[in-house]
DNA sequence: TTGTAGGCGTTATCAG
DNA sequence: CTGATAACGCCTACAA
């Protein structure tokens, strides 16, 4: 009969009892199997297997300086961008034996604050954030925790600590200039769910249009972006601006919805209406014409963010605490 | 100067020192502000604010039976289905003051095993899983932990504990019968990333086709589903089966990609080719004709899963440990 | 209303 | 190579 503790979970003591040693030896074996006698090690391994022992993170969180876990905050669980970012992060953290605690906050600063408090309660050694806007209390909590932080995706002007991102204003400026160079004159910006990146892209759009002496047309909504929402935005834009000949969209979901709607209305893309997206999702390759979009290196941003964070945790010198990972404009045919 | 402990994080002792009381009183205040004198409470609140004290989960994980956290495992971070499931779960857990620890495993049983071990190391009180296939070691770990488990999304024949899902075989059977009733005779099943739900839907497809005396056409790939992958699948299917007049897809991503590709090839949907999807994502409403799909109540499944789990944690009697949440076939026009 | 003592599971440290 | 002891931060139980 297997003895269990109050929590009904197997402890190192149970393993030690089974083998007839002290938990100290079992503990040593777990961290470094060669630190105990080969014979003892074998018995311990067998007991662990037999009892189904699972590590307990609590004591480490309680007593050690490091919990060997980092927290990652993403705005949304259904966005391929952040999925790729997380995969990039985990490619690095796994290789270094770090746990990744994931939390999402639905693009809400106060929700972010609560999730960060929860992650800090789990004693994470570092944080990777994906927004550049934080509540004062969030900033205070992070300061108090005294842990390294990476803000990923953007290049915020007043970073908390380290930054790995790209210049969304510049990328938007460049791609809108391409649209203007194609002869488009009445271009609208379609924005949804007004998060910080949506605003940066709008700034880039505004800069390009203003520089060309063209009017600014903004069609914005606070709703979560979706394909069907895009159709509504286009209908609205065409009603107000019948001469509309181009749309720069804050993301590919909006862009695809706009493109499909335009084609349903009998508009030729890009001749009658240019449509440009952002993020270069796969679906942009499945429509005709292929979608012109801004490709962002989110996997690489994740990797670099994790590398910077772990380097700082190891106390290594960081060459640059602000890293611009750049972007690429895809050669679509929709602009 | 604020005193900090070894971990450099503020503890209740720091708060108590600041006020000139013992940490016990501060602890009491946190759990129930009315348990201490009003004046003391005010001072404690002020000190907590001033020092930026954040709860530490470690002692609770270490000493109490309950960590007030549950673990949730999802296969993918970029799938709206699981995003909705998680939102449903959190709607319930938040209301009950439970933390949700999220992990993803990329549709890989062994990755799932590792993530479950990690969640158990964090002393979660319960688990919500989204797959019905688990490694033997996963099952053993869960048994050893002795915590309640909900398997969500499917109705597995040999459940670990509780189940909240729907009958994918029946849903697929029904929708394929609709295609047959529309006069389609040469229908293919498009499957990607062969997870358990893909297989269940294929079984439903097979059942319907066999019952109608029609041939089984399977076009499968182990790749992650995407719009552009769907185009390849359709090209392949048409090459092998020139008389193809219908496609039942394992999900809407594949279905939309198939529909767009069919239209690019000049095929009329549904007259030349019927296309039916699964999950009823928003994009199905943005294409013409609107996509016929199977709508699954994933938010409600999340809610119900969390409710069952918390009820069991409270020791309440559960009426039924297997809950079928049903499905609905959308009235699209693509079949 | 507030304080004291002890314990949760693991590991650093020091002994053997 | 292995063992004993103390410590981590909080909470339960008991005491004042």
Image: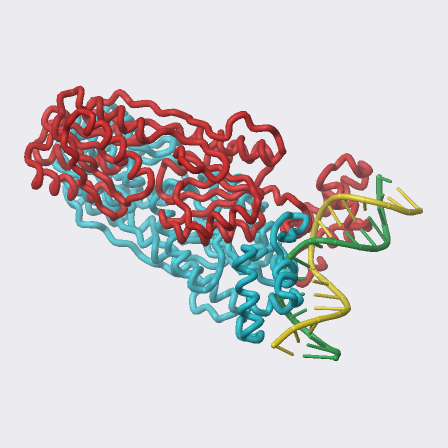
Chain colours: A red, B cyan, C yellow, D green
Q: Is residue B210 visible?
A: yes
Q: Which residue occupies the foreground of this view, A56 or B241? A: A56
User: What percent of the width, then of the height, locates residue D1?
Assistant: 84, 39
Query: Can you say which quadrant of the picture contains the C terminus of chain A?
Result: top left
At 21% from the left and 50% from the top, the residue drawn is B330
Query: Can you say which quadrant of the picture contains the N terminus of chain A?
Result: bottom right
Q: Is residue A71 above or below residue B91?
A: above
- Residue at the outermost front position: B1
Q: Which residue occupies the foreground of this view, D6 or B245? A: D6
User: What percent of the width, then of the height, locates residue A5?
Assistant: 69, 60
How many numbered marks have been drawn onto this rendered protein structure? 0
At 18% from the left and 36% from the top, the residue drawn is A258
At 52% from the left and 57% from the top, the residue drawn is B69
Q: Is residue B157 visible?
A: no
Q: Is residue B265 above or below residue B133?
A: above
Q: Which residue occupies the foreground of this view, D3 or B200? A: D3
Q: Which residue occupies the foreground of this view, A48 or B180? A: A48
User: What percent of the width, then of the height, locates residue B166?
Assistant: 35, 54
Judged left or right of residue B288, residue A317 is: right
User: What percent of the width, then of the height, locates residue A162?
Assistant: 49, 34
Q: Is residue B101 above or below residue A252?
A: below
Q: Is residue A293 above or below residue B305?
A: above
Judged left or right of residue B281, residue A13 is: right
């Amino acid at each position: 009969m297997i003895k269990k503790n109050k929590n009904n979970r197997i402890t190192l003591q149970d393993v030690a009892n089974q083998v007839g040693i002290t938990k100290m030896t079992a503990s040593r074996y777990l961290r470094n199997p060669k630190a105990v006698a080969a014979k003892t090690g074998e018995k311990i391994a067998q007991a662990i297997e037999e009892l189904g022992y699972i590590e307990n993170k609590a004591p480490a969180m309680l007593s050690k300086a490091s919990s060997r876990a980092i927290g990652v905050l993403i705005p949304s669980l259904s966005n391929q961008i952040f999925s790729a970012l997380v995969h990039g992060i985990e490619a690095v953290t796994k290789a270094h034996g770090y746990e990744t605690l994931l939390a999402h906050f639905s693009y809400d600063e106060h929700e972010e604050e609560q999730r960060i408090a929860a992650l800090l309660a789990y004693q994470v050694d570092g944080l990777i954030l994906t927004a550049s806007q934080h509540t004062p209390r969030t900033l205070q909590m992070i300061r108090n925790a005294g842990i390294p932080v990476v803000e990923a995706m953007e290049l915020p002007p007043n970073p908390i600590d380290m930054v790995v991102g790209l210049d969304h204003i510049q990328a938007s400026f460049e791609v809108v200039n391409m649209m203007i160079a194609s002869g488009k004159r009445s271009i609208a910006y379609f924005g949804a769910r007004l998060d910080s990146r949506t605003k940066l892209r709008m700034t880039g759009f505004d800069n390009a249009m203003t520089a060309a002496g063209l009017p600014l047309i903004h069609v914005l909504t606070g709703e979560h972006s979706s394909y069907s929402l895009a159709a509504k935005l286009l209908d609205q834009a065409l009603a107000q601006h019948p001469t509309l000949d181009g749309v720069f969209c804050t993301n590919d979901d909006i862009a695809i919805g706009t493109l499909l709607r335009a084609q349903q209305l009998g508009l030729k893309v890009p001749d009658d209406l240019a449509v440009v997206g952002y993020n270069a999702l796969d679906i942009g390759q499945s429509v005709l014409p292929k979608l012109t979009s801004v490709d962002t290196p989110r996997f690489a941003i994740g990797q670099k963010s994790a590398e910077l964070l772990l380097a700082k945790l190891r106390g290594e010198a960081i060459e640059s605490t602000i890293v611009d990972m750049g972007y690429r404009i895809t050669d679509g045919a929709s602009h």
